[in-house]
Amino acid sequence: MEKNSTLISIQAAQALVLKYSSVTSVIVEMDLCNALDYVLAINVISEIDMPPFRQAAMDGYAFSISSAITYTVVAEIKAGDNANPILKEGEAVRIFTGAPVPTTANAVIMQEKVAIQGHKMTVQMPLVVEMNIRPKGSQIKRGAMALAKGTKIKGAHIGFLASIGITKVSVYAKPSIAIVVTGNELKAAGTPLEYGEIYESNGTMLSAVLQELGYLKTSIITVADDYDQTKTTLKEAIQVHDIVLVTGGVSVGDYDFVGKALKAIGVKEIFYKVKQKPGKPLFFGKMGSVSIFGLPGNPAAALSCFYIYVYPLLKKGEGATNTQLLSIFMPITSDYDVKGDRAQFLKAQIEEDGVQILEGQSSAFAGSFGAANALVFIPEHTPKIKKGERVKTILLPIK
């Protein structure tokens, strides 16, 4: 990374990340119970009708409608029974929710709408054929698609697939991600700070965001501002991970060793420095199949770059065709004077009447990100935005 590296545009940087990405869409089969937050790689087809039989939708009585209003109760069927009694005209069975309805019955009346005397049941409401009966295959029929490829599996999906007997699913494997944190000034939370020291937060923040997105195979590695140690640490991280995120040390200061170390171990630079704010000193490189990002050391800049560049890379690995975060145009809620002429990503909060740009836009301020659910994108050379003007609003993938 040279001091005179030419800044490239945001669009060019995004395209290069995807072009040179070799995070392959590896498909693995896994137990359904472990598939939460994975993306389905192959359509799931139902092998059964669901329900697999005509099913009582409520507690009551099943019978075949006739001119009579009083029926003789001859049996009882509860959920899990496999009885299928042949009902004669004028006969009924006591039945419970989820139980199989006899093939000779064409109605279920709720228990609150009958009068019972001994074994006699008298209906007290108008009757309709197939009332309160769930038809066989009414939820899904055998051979139909139960869940489509590309679906991110949630708890409800797991419940539904389990209900049709699915035990395994084919999903996109998730990459192993290293977060390398650099800086002599960084200390672990919970330890006393000496003068000139700060608590490390970037590694913790990025790991938490990745977990929130469903990526659990992450490692946080710390390294001091030392060239040899940085070189060794990065080489080892690249050898055992699919993606390496380095925070800090990517600028050209006397103690910024990341760029020199990456070059020394053979990482190919794809780009360095993007015409944006925050996150100008962003690095992206490759070593074999491993993608390496040099993220800025300032927390807000690091997180902004993660959402704009790393997130699309992760989505591509899940087989997604639309890899960028969803964006919409919304009116801004107040005037905003833009500082600088670079394109900017501003932390923002979507409200009922539009989008509000938050206070605390410094790249060093991570606190305002906690209130943000969006980033407002400001094109370069935009001096001012007036209240009511529609701005590109990037929706953050927060839960």
Image: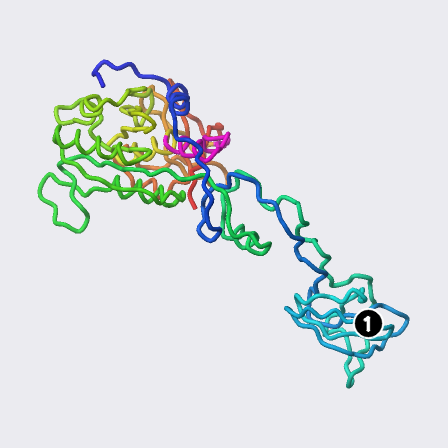
**Of the residues shown, which amino acid type is indicated by label 1?**
Leu
Tell me the quarter of the picture where residue 133 sits. bottom right
Measured from the top left, where is residue 94 in percent x and y? 73, 75
Tell me the quarter of the picture where residue 26 sits. top left
Seen as rendered, the residue at the extreme bottom is 118
Which residue sits at x=70%, y=73%? 77
Closer to us: 157 or 336? 157
Closer to us: 105 or 204? 105
- Relative placement, left or right, of 72 versus 290 is right
Closer to us: 333 or 258? 258
Question: How many residues crowd mark 1 within 10 Å: few (<14), some (14–19), many (20+)?
Answer: some
Residue 82 vertical position relative to residue 335 in the rendered view, above or below: below
- Relative placement, left or right, of 58 versus 247 is right
Which residue sits at x=40%, y=36%? 348
Measured from the top left, where is residue 131 in percent x and y? 77, 62
The boundaries of the magenta stretch are 310-331
**The magenta stretch spans residue 1:** no
Q: Quadrant of the N terminus?
A: top left
Tell me the quarter of the picture where residue 294 sits. top left
Seen as rendered, the residue at the extreme right is 67
Which residue sits at x=18%, y=25%? 261
Task: List the residue tagged with mark 1.
Answer: 87
Residue 363 vertical position relative to residue 95 in the rendered view, above or below: above
- Relative placement, left or right, of 262 versus 21 is left
**The magenta stretch spans residue 311:** yes
Under circle 1, the secondary element is: loop
Measured from the top left, where is residue 214 in percent x and y? 40, 44
Measured from the top left, where is residue 122 in percent x and y? 82, 77
Q: How many marks?
A: 1
Q: How is the image coloured?
A: rainbow
